[in-house]
Image (cartoon, rainbow, N blue to C red):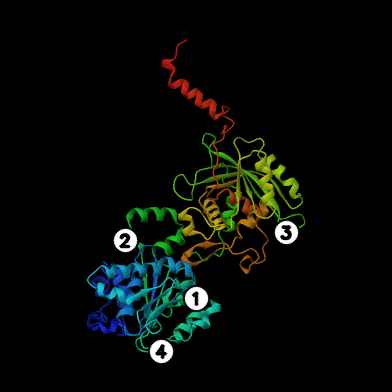
Amino acid sequence: MARKRTLVDDPRWLELCREYQGDIVRFGVEVCGYELSVQQQRLLLSIARPRARTSVASGHGTGKTKSLSIIVLWHLLCFPKSVTLVTANDMDQLNATLWKEVAVTVEKIGLGAFSWIYPHVFVGADNHCHVVGFDDQWFVESKTANAKTANKMAGRHGENFLVIADEGSTVPDEVYTTLTGALTEAHNRMLITSQYTRLSGYFHRTQTELSRENGGDWDAMTFSSVESPWVSDAFLVEKLGEYDDDEKRVRIFGMPPEDSSKFLMSQKVSHALYTRGRIIGDDEPYGWVVSSDVALGEGLRDKSTIGAGRVIGYGDSGPEARRVEVVLIPLFTNQVKSSKLAPRIVEAGAELSNVTYVVDKGGIGGTICQQIEEQGHVLIPVLWGKPCWKKENKDRYLNLRAQASHHAARAAKEGRLSILTLDYKKEMVAQSSGIPKDHSGNFRLKIPEKGSPAWEGRGSPDLWDMVCFFFLENVHYMVADKTGAANTESAAEQAQAAAADLFKDLMTD
């Protein structure tokens, strides 16, 4: 049986190598069929250097992933029996971004002037790509990067060896020690790309002390969304209004975070909650919300809390951003049995108009939520370990807890949160000013697990959690029938009066 023709049997392959091995920009344009931005061209030229060490801190929409697909396929197709190792802390994210883009680029090559290459490239569903006929010798593979798998990274090397670490700010230093130790030959290259999520670790060092600017080996570059032709002005305006200062620096400008605080808000901001007074007018269409964080039981460190407040608006930015006035905190104790808590929560809203109850459903809270629902009350159960539902929040926050905590802290800083009762002020200030923060990959905010070292021995912030419930993305409200003492008519009565006035000329006695 005749041997099946491989890539190296095609005389056009040697010509491809001669033309594009030393010109990756032309490879991206002519072979892959892409238009390239100035930032993308700079990245490609950097990684094409012998013994390249390239580090990219990138904002949104800079074409980084498309550039990586070009680099992966350039290295695979233009260097005989090359090996490329792609690593990241989040393999699911890598599948949804880089590997998807590699598959798209291969398809694009198959539709262009270099379609003869297409049958020689196999892209598998298992994070693996190889030249057909050379499965174990000429390939691209992925491995998860974490401290437990660091030693498994060892063993890959060769004359044409490329390492790519995506979202490299989250990759542990132990992994980098192993990877950089394998780069021993002249045509070995390494590329780290990431959003700049933290001011420590190996990626941070490649951008600072190990950079060529400071006498090191790493070509450190910054990709800004503002300079990208793929990012619209409308997107920039939207995100500049939506993001806080650190999010702007990291997600838009590709710069390191600047806020050195390890907490969401300071004691100064916490104290200001008690000095600004009313922030919602009696004539505004606000609603009433009763919020409750449910403790596990009696005698524990956790305490059950109940708070009632006025709520208006939605989101965390713009003129209609959410404002909250916490009016009452009728309960903060671990002395109420769980069987008695539901009536206490309902009682807190008994005198309020069109009240919405927002109650922690975790643990024994599930039974309490059921009791409140059975009485016919409007209830929004809270399971804030769940991921956010809205896409913009899912991209920014690890889960609902992080979303609500950040929105509440931002409202406090911007004067959109006020506490009108002095009950438990000391505890509230201590809790709200001691919420630690951290970031996962893609600079998604997260709140560390309770009891972890980041909490520095603090107990459960039950009072502040109760306040954060007001800012959950799915907490809606009904406009109160009575929006202040000066307005004694119900919403229905006001509507009837307005209708009567509108049609008064048509009415006869």
Q: Earlier in the sequence, mark 2 or mark 1?
A: 1
SS at mark 1? loop
Q: Amino acid at mark 1?
A: Ala
SS at mark 4? loop
Q: Earlier in the sequence, mark 2 or mark 4?
A: 4
| Nearer the camera: disc 2 or disc 1 | 1
Q: Which mark is residue 401?
A: none
Q: Amino acid at mark 2?
A: Trp
- In the rendered image, which residue does mark 1 sit on? 145
**Residue 53: x, y in percent?**
38, 81
| Nearer the camera: disc 2 or disc 3 | 2
- In the rendered image, which residue does mark 4 sit on? 184
Q: Nearer the viewer, residue 290 or 111?
A: 111
Q: Amino acid at mark 4?
A: Thr
Q: Earlier in the sequence, mark 2 or mark 3?
A: 2
Q: Which mark is residue 230?
A: 2
> How many dots with numbers?
4
Distance from the alpha carbon under mark 3 to that under mark 4 = 55 Å
**Residue 113: x, y in percent?**
22, 71
Quadrant of res 73 = bottom left
Distance from the alpha carbon under mark 2 to that under mark 3 = 51 Å
